[in-house]
Amino acid sequence: MPADQYTVTQRKYIENYEYFTHLKEGCYGANDEEGENACGSVAAQILLSYNNWANDGRLITGSAFLMEGREDVREQPYHEKRLGTTSNESQSNSFYNMMKHYINPIEFGDTTVGAILPTVKVGIERYLRDCTEIASTVTMNYSLTHVMNATRAEINQNRPVLASLAYYDGDSTLHIVVAYGYQTFLINGEEVDGLVAHFGWDSETSNNLWANQAWVNSVLSFQTSHVHTDESLANDAHIIECLTCNRTKTTENHTYSSYQQLNKTDLQYQIYHTAFCDCGYSEKRSHLIRYQKTNALTHKIDCPLCAMPMGEAEHLYKYGDTCFYCDYTLGDY
């Protein structure tokens, strides 16, 4: 279910959670072939893509694995070409197909079940040994007990995990997701703990979903030992690059240059709009409320940044003869 469906009493995300909110369809495998059961491969692809983006740019280096034009947007770390990896089902050496080759039992002739986390772990280890020179710098741990404690510990260290879920949605369903947060819902007056994850579906509704802790049966952590040596990229203090692994990222000094209204199906559209930075980052930010006097009775209300009209209201004379909001003074019209 969506992570904002009920009242949230506690929430913790990794610092780089925006990676998952900006990750778009086409940046990871679709897993949409009937009976393919490749959720473990998709989750591994997203986890490795995240860590390549955030923690060590040497985890994925093959030109067939990286999206075309990726180097052209080095100053836009949140651009989909920087976030994603090749996922074309028909391209045999796309990164998605490479993950299936190493992980998915279907690749080994088993067409009945998808990969379980121990299989995912072994597959990632094989990929790192075969395709990178930094396998020894990665540590993975599989936890079958105290799984939420293990998940919280990793999230608290700003590391997403792979989580195996067993839940009921009309049929008993097994699924592997990338968890990057945990939170507590208040449901019917009772607090219920769970995790927040990207579910790896080829859909805009795949991200920022909540899973009850009762569904989580095991987790797999992933940690790199690389320490970045950063300097500003192209004299832009907002973009920095690691001199060792060539990872690029932004500082917190976003400068928003354009704004867009939220879709009216979003219940928050009257409160927030989307603000865009040239680096590719975007987030919901509150409207800049403007009051413009229109006549002797009313003023107009809008947001000058996104051109969101918010209607009209009567003047409010809190003190004397001047409107508290638009500075209209009696007799101006």
Image (cartoon, grey):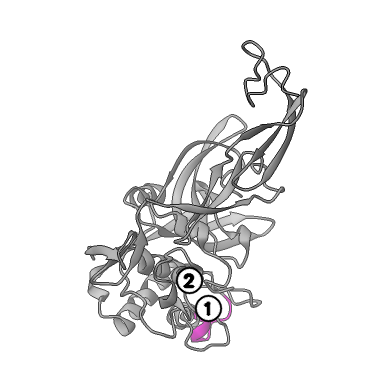
Residue 279 lies, with reference to residue 15, above or below; the image says below
Instruction: Give the class, few, some or many, for how many residues have Cα within 10 Å of label 2's Cα (few <14, many ≥20).
Output: many
Residue type, numbered disc 1: Ser
Residue 161, numbered label:
none
Residue type, numbered disc 2: Gly
Q: For mark 1, give the secondary structure.
A: loop
Any magenta on residue 48?
Answer: no
Residue 115 in sight here:
no
Q: Horizontal and vertical percent for residue 284?
A: 55, 47
* C-alpha span from label 2 to label 1: 8 Å
**Pointer 2 with pointer 1, Cβ within 8 A:** yes
Q: Residue at x 52, y 86 (%)?
A: 109
Q: Nearer the viewer, residue 133 or 125?
A: 133
User: Where does label 2 land, which residue?
Assistant: 84
Q: Residue at x 24, y 63 (%)?
A: 230
Q: Horizontal and vertical percent for residue 300?
A: 71, 33
Q: Nearer the viewer, residue 168 or 210?
A: 210
Q: Is residue 315 left or right of residue 195?
A: right
Q: For mark 2, give the secondary structure.
A: loop
Q: How many marks?
A: 2
Q: Which residues are magenta?
A: 105-112
Q: Is residue 327 left or right of residue 21?
A: right
Question: Which of the 4 image quadrants contains residue 309?
Answer: top right
Q: Residue at x 76, y 24 (%)?
A: 333
User: Where does label 1 land, which residue?
Assistant: 87
Instruction: Give the class, few, some or many, for how many residues have Cα within 10 Å of label 1's Cα (few <14, many ≥20).
Output: many
Question: Which of the 4 image quadrants contains residue 226?
Answer: bottom left
Q: Residue at x 55, y 61 (%)?
A: 199
